[in-house]
Image (tube, rainbow, N blue to C red):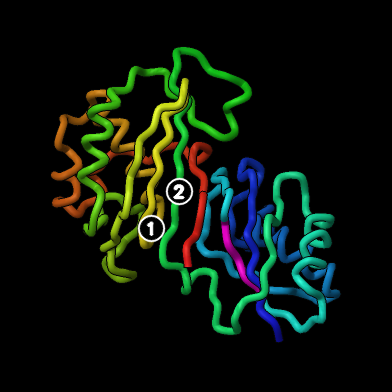
């Protein structure tokens, strides 16, 4: 039995997220497993991803692994996989991995980017990979609030899940950058792990402060509250992209 590590790129617009659904809706995992099953002529080849991206969320560096008995080499598997994949999903790299490699459990850090299209009028060309936001954004305030999130904190206020019985909400954000590129504002977050909808909740909250909905310094109060109701609404999914997973 051999372990293969995949690096994936996909446009999440027409996928119902990463994870296979009981109602058989189109997901990244399901489409990938179907292609692998066809290549290896097996009923199912189980693929494990580094994390579950939501419906509409994209990836430039999603990582997954699978195990199978085969003599195929990575350089042979790469074109075979891409031949059997649809237009909105591609395998960027195939590598052999150690038997104990696990795409999710072996991960040390992940990086997400969130792209905001900030001008008074929409662009049809931007609608799939960024979020249109016509209001004026105070970049200084946005950056000042973002700095308050860097470091080790309890992120309960930024998680859309009941954490009382499930897991520890403490995560470490290594960096949180805010850059303006023309009409785009790109927020990049690297952390040792993320809670469910954590990035989108952070972005929604930062935009709330940057547009005056919340006063300056609100992020510090929200962290201390450890209550999802204390923070802002989640930003829309199409601006979010999984950029990289580090091992």
* Left-right relation of 103 to 204: right
Residue position for label 1: 194
The answer to which quarter of the image holds residue 41 is bottom right
Please give the name of the residue rendered at 61% of the width and 45% of the height, measured from the top-left corner: 12
In magenta segment, residue 139: no
Q: Taken as a whole, is the magenta stretch helix, strand or loop?
A: strand
- Image coordinates for residue 107, horizontal then vertical, percent: 46, 68
241 sits to left or right of 69? left
- Position of the N terminus, as image quadrant, is bottom right
Q: Residues within 10 Å of mark 1 (few under 14, many from 20)?
A: many
> Which secondary structure lies at badge 1?
loop
Discs 1, 2 touching: Cβ within 8 Å: yes
Look at 59% across and 81% down and name the residue there.
98
* Residue 179 versus residue 112 in the image, above or below: above
Which residue is found at the position 23% from the left and 59% from the top?
152
Identity of the residue drawn at 60% across and 66% down: 64
The span shown in magenta is 62-66
Q: Where is residue 139 shown, x and y percent of the image? A: 29, 26
Q: Nearer the viewer, residue 94 or 42?
A: 94
Q: Nearer the viewer, mark 1 or mark 2?
A: 2
Looking at the rendering, which quadrant does residue 140 occupy?
top left
Give percent across and percent down for residue 232: 29, 38
Q: Secondary structure at mark 2?
A: strand
Disc 1 versus disc 2: distance between alpha carbons? 10 Å
The residue furthest top is 120
Name the residue carrying label 2: 112
Q: Which mark is residue 82?
A: none
Relative side of 87 to 229, left or right: right
Q: Earlier in the sequence, mark 1 or mark 2?
A: 2
- The answer to whether 3 is drawn above or below residue 115 in the figure is below
Give 115 or 97, whichever is nearer the viewer: 97
């Amino acid at each position: 039995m051999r372990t293969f590590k995949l690096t994936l790129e996909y446009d999440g617009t027409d996928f119902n997220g990463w994870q296979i659904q009981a109602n058989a809706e189109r997901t990244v995992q399901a489409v990938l497993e179907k292609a692998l099953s066809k290549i290896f002529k097996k009923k199912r080849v189980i693929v494990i991803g580094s994390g579950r991206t939501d419906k509409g969320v994209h990836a430039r560096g999603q990582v997954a692994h699978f195990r199978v008995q085969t003599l195929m080499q990575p350089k042979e598997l790469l074109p075979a996989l891409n031949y059997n994949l649809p237009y909105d999903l591609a395998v960027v790299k195939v590598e052999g991995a150690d038997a104990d490699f696990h795409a999710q459990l072996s991960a040390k850090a992940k990086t997400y980017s969130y792209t905001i299209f900030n001008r008074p009028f929409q662009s049809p060309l931007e609608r799939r990979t960024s979020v249109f936001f016509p209001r004026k954004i105070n970049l200084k305030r946005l950056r000042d609030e973002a700095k308050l999130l860097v470091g080790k904190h309890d992120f309960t206020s930024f998680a859309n899940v009941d954490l009382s019985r499930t897991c520890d909400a403490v995560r470490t954000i290594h960096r949180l950058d805010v850059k303006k590129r023309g009409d785009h504002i790109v927020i990049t977050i690297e952390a040792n792990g993320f809670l469910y909808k954590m990035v989108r909740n952070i972005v929604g909250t930062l935009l709330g402060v940057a547009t005056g909905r919340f006063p300056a310094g609100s992020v510090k109060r929200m962290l201390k509250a450890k209550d999802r109701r204390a923070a802002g609404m989640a930003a829309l999914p199409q601006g979010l992209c999984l950029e990289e997973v580090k091992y």
